[in-house]
Amino acid sequence: MKLYYSPTSPYVRKVMVLLHETDQLDDVELIGASGTPLDPADPLMGKNPLTKVPALERPDGPTLFDSRVICAFLDARAQCGLYPDGNARWDTLTLEALADGILDAALLITYEGRLRPEGMQWDSWADAQWSKIERACAALNQRWMAHLAGPLDMGQIAVACALGYVDFRHDARGWRKGNDALAAWYAEFESRPSLEATRPPEG
Ligand SMILES: N[C@@H](CCC(=O)N[C@@H](CS)C(=O)NCC(=O)O)C(=O)O
């Protein structure tokens, strides 16, 4: 299989952490495909019409996207149970959606600052995206700590990748304030070898 990837993409990181945790790294060749909406990555043309990473090309089926689909596929392939059966599955999927929502908002702030010409940037809009992240972090801190402390699942991996990206690009906004339990959980979780091996490079 070929994984179209970017080393700084937090969505790709979800997949990479899963590959580490489920011992499937050797089954995937990494193909660099960093791009932006303004400058789509060439290797993704014909693979993912949305020209986003991650995308997973398979020898025996259509290319998969997005990160949630790829993670569910790879987990099923290795039968690792990172998406549990029964009622717990809906909690895991909701937690992953919450984490991806943090990422979506954080990426929009990044694009606003990096891609939009300076005179056209709109601080209130970026602040409104940040409000989503604040509400999501508060929800994690208040309602999801028992789940985060439980057996490893894809929801936890997604939350760690989301918080890692917020640290990476928007550290100055200070997501830890008022979220002590979440910050303590993250401090421990990010020391897992799979998280350490996939930390984004500076820049
Ligand atoms: N919902 C998608 C989001 C993927 C995404 O936005 N990836 C970014 C990199 S972090 C990208 O490829 N952006 C290029 C673009 O938007 O054109 C997923 O979960 O995989």
Image: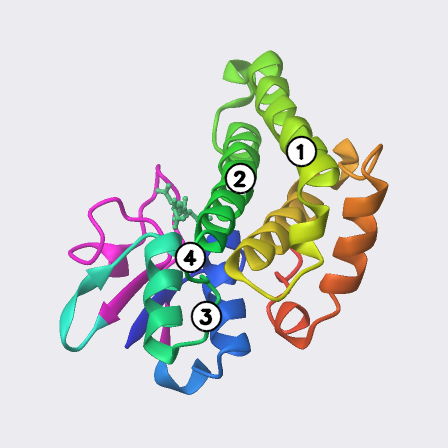
Q: Position of residue 110 (x, y in %)?
A: 56, 36
Asked whether disc 4 touches disc 1, contact meaning CB atoms under 8 Å apart, the reply is: no
Distance, label 3 to label 4, CA atoms, is 11 Å
Q: Nearer the viewer, residue 165 or 118?
A: 165
Distance, label 4 to label 1, CA atoms, is 23 Å
Mark nearest the camera among 3 and 1 is: 3
Residue at the image position 80 percent from the left and 39 percent from the top: 176
Q: Can you identify the residue that label 3 sits on?
A: 81
Residue at the image position 14 percent from the left and 76 percent from the top: 60
Q: Position of residue 152 (x, y in %)?
A: 60, 66
Q: Can you identify the residue that label 4 sits on?
A: 86
| Residue type at numbered disc 1 | Ala
Distance, label 3 to label 2, CA atoms, is 20 Å
| Residue type at numbered disc 4 | Gly
Considering the numbered disc 3 on the image, is that residue within a helix, a strand or a loop? loop
Residue 37: quadrant of the picture: top left
On screen, residue 84 versus residue 38, left or right, reads right
| Residue type at numbered disc 2 | Leu
Considering the numbered disc 1 on the image, is that residue within a helix, a strand or a loop? helix
On screen, residue 77 versus residue 133, left or right, reads left
Outermost residue to the bottom: 26
Residue 46: quadrant of the picture: bottom left
Outermost residue to the front: 86
Q: Along the polypeptide, which appears first: circle 3 or circle 4?
A: 3
Residue at the image position 20 percent from the left and 58 percent from the top: 47
Asked whether disc 2 touches disc 1, contact meaning CB atoms under 8 Å apart, the reply is: yes
Q: Does the magenta stretch include residue 36?
A: yes
Q: Along the polypeptide, which appears first: circle 4 or circle 2?
A: 4
Please report the bounds of the magenta region as a residue range. 29-57
